[in-house]
Amino acid sequence: MSELSRRAFLAASGLAVVARGSLVIPSSAWAAPKTGVAAPAFTASATTGKAVSLADQRGQIVVLEWTNHECPYVRKHYETGNMQALQKEATAQGVVWLTIISSAPGTQGFVSAAEADQLTASRQAAPSAVLLDPTGAVGKMYGATNTPHMYVIDKAGTLMYAGAIDDRPTTRRSDVQGAQNYVREALQAVAAGQPVKTPVTRAYGCTVKYA
């Protein structure tokens, strides 16, 4: 079967076609939450061993960032300092930034708590906490399909943005400069009590390595 025929078959079968070499994930496997409604509640373990609950963050703006340190798309944003700059900018304004790792054991991007902390330190990243989701329960709850996949939740617990970090779906470092950063725009709108201009975009990157 040719690649074109394969893609047509997958589309007709309700399967998501993703980048060459990545997993093909059934689009019906889980439903992504809608923006403008309550974000799915969850509790997950941080690398410190502490349980972190979304409910405990009520009254604060929250960013969820799905990551995989081996993914070239993630590396683009960390090796240029783009992700760290956004983290520091957001947390300095009181935003809670939760980085989530949903790679299953034995898959690309899976790390122990100690390894995750070492990555945070070596990259000079600045999330509020790094959460471990090896079963993929939280990721599937949010319909996270790629790394990075980004979400912004307002102080009332409403999901206000879901999608890509920016409008440059490449691994080229040079594309960071001049990109439209959807997450920054969403955070600015939410902080100002205004609607997010583009509440949903298509996330790009590596597929989340679920079990």
Image (cartoon, rainbow, N blue to C red):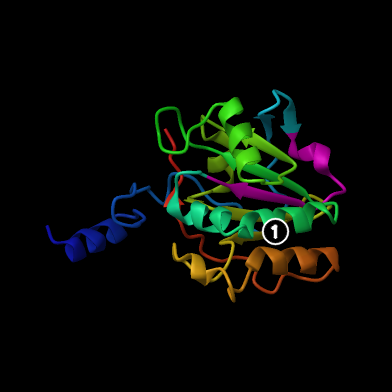
Which residue is depicted at the point 69% across and 74% down? Answer: 197
Whether residue 132 is visible, yes or no, is no
| Residue closer to the observer: 91 or 53 | 91
Amino acid residing under circle 1 = Leu
In the rendered structure, the answer to whether residue 38 lies left or right of residue 114 reads: right
Query: Which of these two is toward me, 40 or 181?
Result: 181
Give residue 169's position: percent from left, percent from top: 47, 66
Q: Residue furthest front?
A: 122
The residue at 71%/69% (across/down) is: 185
Q: Which residues are magenta?
A: 53-67
Q: Which residue is mark 1?
A: 86
Looking at the figure, which quarter contains the N terminus?
bottom left
**Residue 94 or 5: which is nearer the viewer?**
94
Q: Residue at x 70, y 49 (%)?
A: 39
Give the vertical position of 190 relative to 24 (above or below): below
Please rate how many residues cluster around mark 1, counting C-alpha atoms within 10 Å: few if below 14, some from 14 to 19, many from 20.
some
The quadrant in which residue 200 appears is bottom right
* Res. 193 image quadrant: bottom right
Against 208, is 151 above or below? below
The single residue placed furthest to the top in the displayed view is 49
User: Does the rendering let one see residue 44?
Assistant: yes
- Say which element carries label 1: helix
Q: What residue is rendered at 53% in x and 48% in y?
A: 144
Residue 147 percent coordinates (x, y): 50, 50
On screen, residue 70 versus residue 158, left or right, reads left
Q: Position of residue 93 (x, y in %)?
A: 85, 56
Question: Which residue lies most toward the left here?
Answer: 1
Membership of 75 in magenta stretch? no
